[in-house]
Amino acid sequence: MISGCAIVAGVVGRPIAHSLSPQIHNAWLEAAGVDGVYVPFAPDDRGFERLVEGFRGGAIRGLNVTLPFKEAALAISSQPSEAAQAAGAANVLVFEPDGRIVADNTDGVGLLRAFRAQAPQWDVAAGPVAVLGAGGAARGAVAALIAAGAPEVRVVNRTLAKAETLVGMLGPKARALPWSRAADAFGEATAVINATSGGLDGADGFDIPLAATPEACVVMDMVYKPLATGLLKAARALGRPTVDGLEMLIGQAVPSFEAFFGVSPPAGVDVRGLALKALGEKTA
Ligand code: ATR
């Protein structure tokens, strides 16, 4: 039921047509019996600020923000959380009635929730973690891993200078390595996380020396289209435990939902099944 008092939230990004967030949030809203709705927005580059300014003061309760607006979302906020500042980007904006725009970044929470769900044996504090990539997604992951207690995060990137810049922002627990030293980065790693924008299926010519990882090393890919990326398939072939990007997407949606609608998502809703169906993946 959507009444005249419905809480409105949404997701802003471009492109947005294939976003799974409306399905996930609306399924939770319906199951929880919350008088609310979650809708998509796709402004052009310059339209993002106008859209957000229009909502200032609480015209809607909040927005999830996805590419390419996450950095702009942090910049427009008057009250960014520590996580958003550390990530240099926001994926949640909440519009307070007094005009404040509160920003948060729940991608790190989503990453850790995904590990808890699919690799519960993994302990963030047990050893070094290797992160592939040095863009916005990598920065958020590295910041969240350090905040959660990782003793060392090894940032491996095609362009070493970008990894060095990222590491410079995040302090002594982060180390930068070029792709040619990926095997060194993987030694003793408790997890390898792909935060590049590609699925790293080998077609790009990059050798991902997963055999250099310890047997218990968890391999995670933030990419979820396709769900079984080249990296995850290679990891499974070696017998490594894996975590997929869809679980992270669902994981970041949980604290977003709580921020917008004031209640936790109800248990027992198969949002993963819904998302798999929307992605055209088998639910088994
Ligand atoms: P995002 O905000 O999604 O992280 P980004 O800031 O554009 O996106 O960063 C993309 C990351 O993926 C970068 O680390 C990029 O490597 P470079 O810094 O060398 O450009 C990495 N990347 C993109 N395509 C890649 C590929 N085919 N192989 C390896 N790394 C790739």
Image: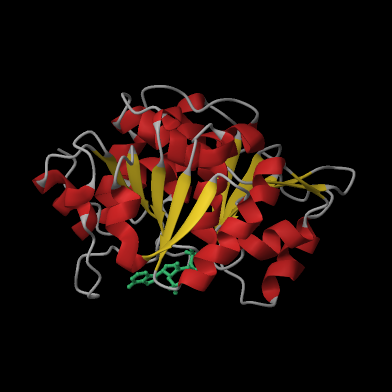
Where residue 190 sits in the image (x, y, percent)? Answer: 33, 37
Viewer-proximal residue among 219 and 284? 219
In the rendered image, which quarter contains the N terminus? top right
> In the visual, does 76 lie left or right of 245?
right
Q: Can see residue 258?
A: yes
Question: Which residue occupies the foreground of this view, 264 or 113?
Answer: 113
Residue located 25% across and 48% down the image: 277
Q: Quadrant location of the C terminus?
A: top left
Quarter of the rendered image showing ligand 1: bottom left
Q: Residue furthest right?
A: 98
The quadrant holding residue 31 is top left
Which is nearer the eye, 174 or 277?
174
> Picture quarter containing residue 54?
bottom right
Residue 170 image position (x, y, % from top left): 62, 51
Identify which residue is drawn at 49% across, 36% down.
Answer: 150
Q: Position of residue 216 (x, y in %)?
A: 23, 33
Q: Is residue 221 visible?
A: no
Residue at 50%, 25% in the rendered image = 32
Decide: is 219 above or below 162. above
